[in-house]
Image (cartoon, helix red, strand yellow):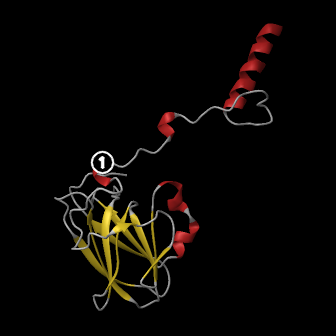
């Protein structure tokens, strides 16, 4: 019976160590993360630097940094919405959230986005590698957004007009039915 008790205690300590209880994990080497825990890279057509089919005449359109607020024409924008970054509470403070999906409740990323003001003046032309573009601008400001899947010749161009609300967050959804999810 004494040997069984030792086995149970050893198994319990081993299980506790594998579940990350540091007080019980003595002399246990740290394990590398499992290979499936790493996010997969985007497909080749969505890799940064790939030519864009729908560049709206602007071959200079570049990638917007992920999860970093960026000023475009005095308007603060952010490309985000993937991984744990999508849960960052600061994103809820942006009055506009533009979302890209395929109509089957699946997000799309790698969108070539053009943002223009009410008068039609282009504010930004970029590729967003996340499924959301957040916009912070004065309440009552009006804008137009157009987007297409970068690097996909068959991607339709979708657009929407929106006005920044005085409070809360407005979702502007651009849906691309029939496109396969890439997130």
Name the spot of residue 29 as percent of width and height, x first.
Answer: 70, 29
Mark 1 is surrounded, within 10 Å at the Cα level, by few (under 14), some (14 to 19) or many (20 or more) other residues, namely few
Q: Is residue 130 above or below residue 45?
A: below
Q: Nearer the viewer, residue 47 or 128?
A: 47
Residue drawn at x 54%, y 61% as measured from the top left: 87
Name the spot of residue 168 as percent of width and height, x first.
Answer: 49, 80
Residue 158 seen in render:
yes
Residue 49, quarter of picture: bottom left
Q: In the orientation shown, which residue stands out farthest toward the left?
A: 154
Name the spot of residue 64 as percent of width and height, x first.
Answer: 42, 67
Residue with the mark numbered 1: 44
Please indicate whether residue 18 sits to the left or right of residue 90 in the image.
right
Q: Nearer the viewer, residue 27 or 103?
A: 27
Please indicate whether residue 90 sits to the left or right of residue 166 in the image.
right
Quadrant of image for the N terminus: top right
Q: In the orientation shown, which residue stands out farthest toward the right?
A: 2
Q: Is residue 150 above or below residue 56?
A: above
Residue drawn at x 19%, y 65% as measured from the top left: 156
Name the spot of residue 155 as percent of width and height, x first.
Answer: 20, 61
Q: Secondary structure at mark 1?
A: helix
Residue drawn at x 21%, y 66% as measured from the top left: 54
Q: Is residue 32 above or below residue 182?
A: above
Residue 1 seen in render:
no
Q: Is residue 3 above or below residue 120?
A: above
Q: How many marks?
A: 1
Residue drawn at x 34%, y 52% as measured from the top left: 47
Please indicate whether residue 28 sits to the left or right of residue 100 in the image.
right
Please indicate whether residue 140 sits to the left or right of residue 182 in the image.
right
């Amino acid at each position: 019976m004494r040997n069984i008790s030792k086995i149970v205690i050893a198994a319990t300590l081993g299980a506790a160590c594998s579940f990350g209880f540091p007080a019980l994990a003595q002399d246990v080497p740290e394990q590398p993360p499992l290979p499936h825990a790493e996010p997969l890279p985007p497909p080749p057509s969505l890799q940064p630097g790939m030519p864009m089919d729908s560049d709206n005449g602007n071959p200079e359109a570049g990638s917007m940094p992920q999860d970093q607020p960026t000023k475009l024409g005095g308007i603060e924008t952010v490309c985000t919405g993937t991984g744990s970054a999508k849960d960052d509470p600061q994103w809820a403070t942006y009055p506009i959230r533009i979302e890209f999906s395929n109509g089957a409740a699946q997000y799309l990323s790698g969108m070539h986005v053009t943002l223009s003001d009410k008068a039609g003046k282009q504010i930004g032309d970029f590729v967003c590698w996340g499924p959301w573009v957040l916009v912070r601008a004065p309440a009552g400001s009006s804008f137009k957004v157009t987007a297409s899947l970068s690097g996909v010749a068959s991607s339709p161009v979708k657009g929407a007009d929106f006005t920044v609300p005085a409070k809360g967050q407005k979702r502007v959804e651009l849906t691309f039915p029939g496109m396969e999810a890439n997130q």
